[in-house]
């Protein structure tokens, strides 16, 4: 009986001590590799959510709650969950709670990485770039011939969980920034070279995807990292990027002109009018302004004869769903995260990703409760790693 009763405890210990960092890589794998969103969600639940439920211990609640940023995030989750009741209960609420479970599973695994697997964080970073590069290759294989004269439509880049070109761009941009950090800080020359090539290749794909929000994420994040790690490597990667840009301009002027024309043709994509309508709708009622319309409320609305799925700004959507209370909880979480990044150089990679994604959220972003997605890997994962103080090695650490 004693042996049987200890079997679950042994399984829980093995998952905690050996699997936590693998679960983070499994989350990345589920985002990048499956070509079908349903398959990706099922794989994520099997490899990330179910093991989390098996190894979860009540004793973990106290150390999680001691983290200031974790408290802010859990309060935000609680408030968003509560707003599901504003418009009554439905099957949509159940689906959103399952998405919340997806997010909390990754939150928990990053907590365990911070507890027992900090020494493996370089492997997580290298695995992130390798999985992202493989996902990028699969995206490329799904594209039509990118060099034909009529090519260039941004919708051709969609694949798997990345069902919008902006999501493809976020995923590739965040992976490129992780590769850039490894290039700037890695001690091994082969690792440095591999990640330098990954930065250039992924950056080129971000350009070709034509997601302007991803351009902002990539450029702002890269500038932050280069400023935080100045020196010969920073100069080398900046020079290589400039040389690549000039080469492409000389070799493929027609294709680049086509990309530029399509970017200009889309203009602001109606963002200003969408934001104006959103603000007007939210200020009609004091109740809705302060408490929101509920996370399960439908944000889709008509604009100029077309349907906008949501308000294309994360804070504005947060205001719609959760009101001023939800926005304040979100901002409190961000402030707590960035204070940690400013205090510890080993956390600044995650800080750079979080800041860059906030700039990307100016023109896009919907709910925080998601299935496997670009938002999960490009924002929530770095935010959780930052919140639990999972440091990456800096050159000063190695010295």
Image (cartoon, grey):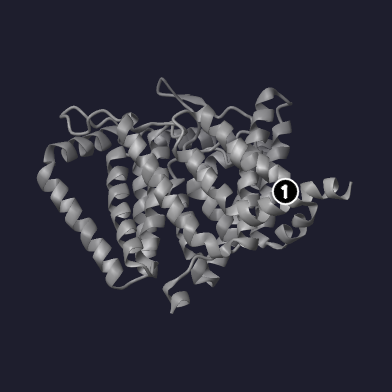
Work out whether residue 333 or residue 150 is closer to the camera in this orientation and state it.
150
Judge from the rendering whether residue 284 lies leftward or rightward of residue 8; answer left or right. Answer: left
Which residue is most to the left?
Answer: 250
Observer-nearest of 45 and 297: 45
Relative to 130, residue 225 above or below: below
Q: Picture coordinates of residue 35 (x, y %)?
A: 44, 30
State the residue position of label 1.
11
Q: Residue at the location (53% across, 41% down)?
A: 316
Q: Quadrant of residue 159?
A: top left
Number of numbered labels in the structure image: 1
Left or right, residue 258 beside residue 58: left
Give the image location of residue 201, x and y in percent. Answer: 28, 49
x and y, in percent, of residue 295 in the image: 64, 34
Instruction: Indicate whether 208 appears above or below 37.
Output: below
The residue sitting at 73% across, 26% down in the picture is 89
- The residue sitting at 70% across, 50% down in the picture is 75
Against 338, is 201 above or below? above
| Residue found at the far right of this picture | 1
Residue 125 appears at what percent x and percent y?
Answer: 46, 56
């Amino acid at each position: 009986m004693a042996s049987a009763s200890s079997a679950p405890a042994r399984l829980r210990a093995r998952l905690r001590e050996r699997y936590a960092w693998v679960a983070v890589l499994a989350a990345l794998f589920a985002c990048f590799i499956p070509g079908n969103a349903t398959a990706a969600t099922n794989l994520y639940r099997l490899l990330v959510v179910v093991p989390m439920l098996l190894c979860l211990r009540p004793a973990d609640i106290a150390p999680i709650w001691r983290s200031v940023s974790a408290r802010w995030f859990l309060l935000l989750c609680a408030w968003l969950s509560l707003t599901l009741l504003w418009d009554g209960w439905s099957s949509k609420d159940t689906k959103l709670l399952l998405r919340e479970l997806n997010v909390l599973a990754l939150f928990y695994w990053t907590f365990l990485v911070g507890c027992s697997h900090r020494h493996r964080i370089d492997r997580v970073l290298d695995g992130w770039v390798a999985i992202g590069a493989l996902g990028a290759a699969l995206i490329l294989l799904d594209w039509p011939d990118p060099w034909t004269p009529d090519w260039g439509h941004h919708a051709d880049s969609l694949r798997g969980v990345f069902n919008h070109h902006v999501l493809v761009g976020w995923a590739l941009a965040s992976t490129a920034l992780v590769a850039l950090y490894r290039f700037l800080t890695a001690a091994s020359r082969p690792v440095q070279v591999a990640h330098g090539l990954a930065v250039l290749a992924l950056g080129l794909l971000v350009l070709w995807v034509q997601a302007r929000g991803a351009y902002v994420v990539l450029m702002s994040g890269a500038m932050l990292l280069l400023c935080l790690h100045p020196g010969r490597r920073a100069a080398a990667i900046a020079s290589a990027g400039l040389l690549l840009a000039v080469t492409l301009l000389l070799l493929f002027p027609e294709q680049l002109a086509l990309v530029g024309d399509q970017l200009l043709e889309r203009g602001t994509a109606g963002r200003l009018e969408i934001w104006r309508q959103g603000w007007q709708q939210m200020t009609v009622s004091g109740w809705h302004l302060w408490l929101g319309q509920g996370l399960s409320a439908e944000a889709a609305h008509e604009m100029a004869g077309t349907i906008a799925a949501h308000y294309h700004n994360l804070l504005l959507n947060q205001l719609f769903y959760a009101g001023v209370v939800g926005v304040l909880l979100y901002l409190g979480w961000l402030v707590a995260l960035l204070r940690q990044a400013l205090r510890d150089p080993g956390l600044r990679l995650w800080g750079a990703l979080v800041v860059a994604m906030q700039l990307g959220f100016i023109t896009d972003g919907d709910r925080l409760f998601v299935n496997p997605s670009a938002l999960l890997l490009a924002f929530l994962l770095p935010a959780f790693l930052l919140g639990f103080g999972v440091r990456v090695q800096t050159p000063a650490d190695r010295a």
